[in-house]
Image (spheres, rainbow, N blue to C red):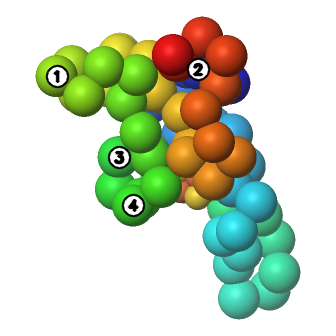
Amino acid sequence: MLLPEKEARFKTCPLLKTSDDKMKFCQGEACMMWRFKNPQRKDETDPGYCGLAGKPAGAM
Ligand code: SF4
């Protein structure tokens, strides 16, 4: 799913959990798995995706 980092930060991450086992939100660019669609454009409004599941269709 391509979306701006500022929206991704309101999606739950499949890996991160709190100490009491609750889901946490995506960390966006602060996470090593975050990828911007265009590596030259890294603003929070530029589209990107979580690299865990590979490239989404629109990111080619
Ligand atoms: S980019 Fe990182 S923090 Fe965001 S969903 Fe993927 S693994 Fe979780």
Q: Is residue 15 left or right of residue 9?
A: right
Mark carried by residue 2: 2
Pick the residue in front: 32 or 26.
32
Element under label 3?
helix
Element under label 2?
loop
Nearer to us: label 3 or label 2? 2
Give neighbour class at mark 4: few <14, some 14-19, many 20+ (Cα, 10 Å): few
Exactly how many numbered labels are in the figure?
4
Task: Say which label, 1 or 3, has the lower sequence index.
Answer: 3
Residue 51 locus on image (x, y percent): 55, 46
Task: Say which label, 4 or 2, has the lower sequence index.
Answer: 2
Q: Amino acid at mark 2?
A: Leu
- Residue at figure coordinates x 44%, y 46% from the top left: 34
Task: Say which label, 2 or 1, has the lower sequence index.
Answer: 2
Q: CA distance from mark 1 to mark 4?
A: 17 Å
Give neighbour class at mark 1: few <14, some 14-19, many 20+ (Cα, 10 Å): few
Q: CA distance from mark 2 to mark 1?
A: 16 Å
Residue ID for mark 3? 29
Residue ID for mark 1? 40
Element under label 1?
loop
Q: Amino acid at mark 1?
A: Gln
Residue 13 locus on image (x, y percent): 69, 55
Q: CA distance from mark 4 to mark 3?
A: 7 Å
Q: CA distance from mark 3 to mark 2?
A: 14 Å
Q: Whereabouts is ligand 1, in terms of quadrant?
A: bottom right
Q: Amino acid at mark 4?
A: Met
Q: Amino acid at mark 3?
A: Glu
Residue ID for mark 4? 32
From this view, report whether residue 45 is shown above or below residue 27.
above
Q: Is mark 4 within 8 Å of ligand 1?
A: yes
